[in-house]
Image (cartoon, rainbow, N blue to C red):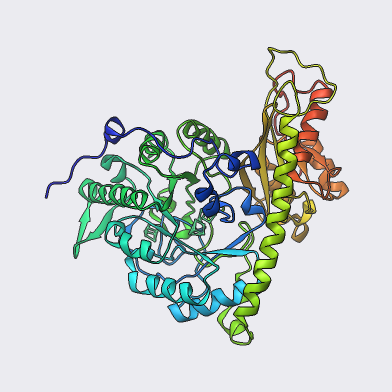
């Protein structure tokens, strides 16, 4: 059968449907407009709700070694780049080992709500192993949500089976809807026992992805679309992808930066294809946001990640350690239910406080106290970095942070826009062998941010940050992140710092 050309999908797209919020799950407010049945599905999923990612954890089990396509950004000795940062999967698991591991993690990390299968290959290219794992977990750990991430090639034939296992969340990696673009990303696919190359391969893959997406939506399964932003290949095209998947009812779009290093041995890495800058990523996410709910808190997890997004506790749960654990899952479930109820009570309290604050009359979106605002004036947005260990609080020492969350604060409110990974300052301080100190690298990673909030910071990094035009701030230790950021924005406003564009550019002086 001849396959339709899919590069004009948006012209034929049906009217848009689904959630109209710009950033689902970003704040209490953005969650509150969702219909109850959707809210129920996303409120404790750390990837589908930005708020939940501060409180709830996920884990992946690496049960799926094979893949049915080749992406130019993947080397299968490493984790699946759909859903992971490069790094060898520590242990490939059989389904029974995976089930044991999930129960051990869920008993020891009661905040764990979601089990995802995301590699190291494609879960649906390994359907027996994937579905055996889901089947056993549905029976033995019924309080855990199941999640899967796929390239979509084998999706249509597996949709029924996914629905049977009560899987509410599916991620499809869709990097293009135009086969000409696809041919630059996928050298081949394995389809009906044959290797197919070039535009034809991309055409089949796109058709399968779109068909799978439609079938999942028809069955009420929430779909998140991941796209890898590859500068010069699909950067402009991803706006079209966003429009198309939204028009079909996808819930969330997650545009992730390409990771391409020569040492990973990927085609792009070896060919010197560059990754996007944080500014390029944010600008594309902003452009797509008009059409779609955007995910901005993705950490490109390993295929065997364990813990809150951004942390990896996998080494606490290696097979030999699990063997020694004595797990009573009945008891663990009771404890998990208590912990979840506490988190929900805290979140409900925050939601109520936000609702009361929002109902108070004010000139603009945030409380500016006694500051007189010019009614027609727009005050500039400010990027602020935060060191946190979770719980939605500013609760991490600058020197202990392996990543900083980045928020954009405007007169209309606070929005998480990304994160920046760093080297650990306290573990180093010496040069990294390339003439640049760890501190200088951290400062460079914070480019664009005007302030960094943390629970504590030493004298040396304080001075270097200040000299580089980034204001360190330890005054809001142990405060909720959004409240603290609003307070800092208000201080800047009162000091008249938001009237003119930011003049100071980053000057990294620490060498
Ligand atoms: Fe895993 Fe993916 Fe499910 Fe989340 S991860 S299968 S939806 S449970 Fe989440 Fe990790 Fe980003 Fe994936 S932060 S890479 S989006
Ligand atoms: Fe690698 Fe995932 Fe692409 Fe398969 S789908 S080639 S595992 S990145």
Is residue 144 toward the left or the right of residue 153 in the image?
Answer: right
Instruction: Please report the residue visible at 37 percent of the width from the left and 63 percent of the height from the top.
Output: 162
Front in this rendered view, residue 152 or 351: 351
Q: Is residue 140 visible?
A: yes
The image shows residue 271 at horizontal and vertical percentages of 40, 49
The image shows residue 242 at horizontal and vertical percentages of 41, 38
Is residue 506 toward the left or the right of residue 190 in the image?
Answer: right
Whether 412 is drawn above or below 27: the answer is above
Dividing the picture into quadrants, the one containing residue 399 is bottom right
Is residue 222 toward the left or the right of residue 333 in the image?
Answer: left
Q: In which quadrant will I find the C terminus?
A: top right
Dividing the picture into quadrants, the one containing residue 401 is bottom right
Report the residue that reaches farthest toward the left: 1
Whether 264 is drawn above or below 226: the answer is below
Whether 113 is drawn above or below 443: the answer is below
Front in this rendered view, residue 42 or 229: 42
Front in this rendered view, residue 209 or 440: 209
The image shows residue 67 at horizontal and vertical percentages of 34, 64
Instruction: Please report the residue visible at 37 percent of the width from the left and 61 percent of the height from the top.
Output: 163
Is residue 306 toward the left or the right of residue 255 in the image?
Answer: right
The image shows residue 299 at horizontal and vertical percentages of 57, 53
How many numbered discs? 0
Q: Is residue 511 visible?
A: no
């Amino acid at each position: 059968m001849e396959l339709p050309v899919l590069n004009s999908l948006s012209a034929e797209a049906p009217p848009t449907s689904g959630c109209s919020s710009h950033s689902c799950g970003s704040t209490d407010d953005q969650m509150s407009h969702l219909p109850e049945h959707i809210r129920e599905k996303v409120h404790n999923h750390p990837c589908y709700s930005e708020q939940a990612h501060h409180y709830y954890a996920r884990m992946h089990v690496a049960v799926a070694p094979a893949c049915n396509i080749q992406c130019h950004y993947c080397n299968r000795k490493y984790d699946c780049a759909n859903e992971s940062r490069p790094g060898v999967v520590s242990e490939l698991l059989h389904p029974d080992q995976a089930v044991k591991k999930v129960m051990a993690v869920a008993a020891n990390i009661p905040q764990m709500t979601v089990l995802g299968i995301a590699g190291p290959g494609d879960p649906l290219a390994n359907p027996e192993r994937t579905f055996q794992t889901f089947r056993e977990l549905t029976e033995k750990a019924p309080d855990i949500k199941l999640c899967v991430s796929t390239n979509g090639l084998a999706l249509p034939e597996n949709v029924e089976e996914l629905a049977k296992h009560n899987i509410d969340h599916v991620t499809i990696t869709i990097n293009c809807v135009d086969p000409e673009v696809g041919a630059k990303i996928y050298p081949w696919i394995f389809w009906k026992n044959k290797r197919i190359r070039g535009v034809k391969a991309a055409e089949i893959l796109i058709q399968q992805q779109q068909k799978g997406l439609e079938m999942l939506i028809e069955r009420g399964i929430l779909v998140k679309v991941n796209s890898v932003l590859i500068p010069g290949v699909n950067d402009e095209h991803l706006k079209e992808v966003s429009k198309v998947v939204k028009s079909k009812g996808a819930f969330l779009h997650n545009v992730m930066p390409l990771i391409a290093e020569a040492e990973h041995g990927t085609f792009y890495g070896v060919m010197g294809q560059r990754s996007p800058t944080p500014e390029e990523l944010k600008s594309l996410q902003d452009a797509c946001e008009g059409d779609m709910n955007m995910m901005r808190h993705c950490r490109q997890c390993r295929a065997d990640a364990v813990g809150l997004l951004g942390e990896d506790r996998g080494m606490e749960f290696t097979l030999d350690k699990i063997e020694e654990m004595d797990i009573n899952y009945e008891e663990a479930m009771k404890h998990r239910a208590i912990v979840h109820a506490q988190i929900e009570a805290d979140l409900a309290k925050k939601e109520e406080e936000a609702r009361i604050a929002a109902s108070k009359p004010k000139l603009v979106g945030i409380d500016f106290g006694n500051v007189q605002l010019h009614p027609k004036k727009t005050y500039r947005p400010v990027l602020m970095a935060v060191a946190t260990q979770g719980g939605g609080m500013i609760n991490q020492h600058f020197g202990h942070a392996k990543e900083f969350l980045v928020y954009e604060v405007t007169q209309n409110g606070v929005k998480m826009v990304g994160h920046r990974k760093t080297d650990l300052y306290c573990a180093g301080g010496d040069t990294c062998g390339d003439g640049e100190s760890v501190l200088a690298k951290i400062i460079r990673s914070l480019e664009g941010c005007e302030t960094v909030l943390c629970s504590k910071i030493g004298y040396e990094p304080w001075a270097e940050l200040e000299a580089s035009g980034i204001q360190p701030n330890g005054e809001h230790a142990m405060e909720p992140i959004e409240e603290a950021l609003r307070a800092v924005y208000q201080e800047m406003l009162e000091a008249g710092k938001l009237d003119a564009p930011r003049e100071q550019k980053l000057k990294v002086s620490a060498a």
